Amino acid sequence: MWGQLILFISSVYCLYLAIFKLDTKKNDIKWVLILALVVWITSLFFNSVDTPQIDIYVAEILHIFTMSLVLTLLLIIVRNLRPAIFRYPYFLVYSPLLIPLFFFLIIDTYLIKTIIIMTTQFIAIFVYLLLIFDENALTHKRSIGIISSVLIILSYCSYWFLIELIPFSDIIWQITLSAGIVTAIYTLSKKLTINHTVLKNESRG
């Protein structure tokens, strides 16, 4: 109960940061992040109440759609951080949005569905780690990014591997995820601002 409430409040706060505090000239980054947070908050609603089985399916679809949007967001950021000559075609950043389409085909298959969700989350965490250790990151911003990575990894491990072994594991992953996503969005917003400033200064030079 309390863990769900904390997760919901932190998600709403992240939405506030994305709308009002994200300082970037790239509108695609901002709107994909906002959409991901809105879908995520909606999925939290379906997971927070005793609902029929069909609502559980809706929550799972919303969750996998959120993760596909997160992957899209990370691919956009990775592309923008690369020099123009090394950038992959822009349309490829939206390729993760195909994941929900395949998810519909296996939604009644528990094992495959679980593997897809686990793998999608793992890939998102891995790409985020690559961003944190990007050479453009400043030391103090990178340290916050590392903290957010550790929190998100702890949440991932406690949800998938410790939930049946440790009492109160639900509140552990909810609190660590809450802190992780807030610090992650703060880190990404600062990183995007720093990168935009660096590119602007280079163009002037």
Image (cartoon, grey):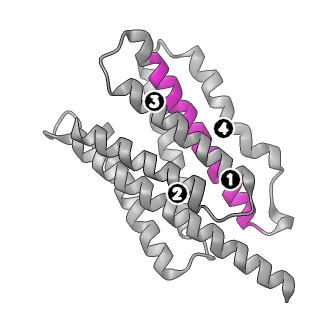
Q: How many marks?
A: 4
Going from N to C along the chain, the mark reached first, 4 or 2, is 2
Q: Position of residue 22 (x, y in %)?
A: 60, 61
Q: Residue furthest bottom?
A: 205
The kind of residue tagged 4 is Pro
Q: Which residue is mark 4?
A: 96
Q: Residue at x 58, y 17 (%)?
A: 104
Q: Which residues are magenta?
A: 57-82
| Separation (CA) of disc 1 from disc 4 | 15 Å
Q: Quick one: quadrant of the N terminus?
A: top left
Q: Which residue is mark 1?
A: 29
Does the residue at mark 3 contact the one at mark 4 (Cβ under 8 Å)? no
The local secondary structure at tag 1 comes to: helix
Does the residue at mark 1 contact the one at mark 4 (Cβ under 8 Å)? no
| Separation (CA) of disc 3 from disc 4 | 19 Å
| Displayed quadrant of residue 65 | top right
Residue 2 horizontal side relative to residue 121, left or right: left
Seen in the picture, residue 165 relative to 48 is either above or below; the reply is below
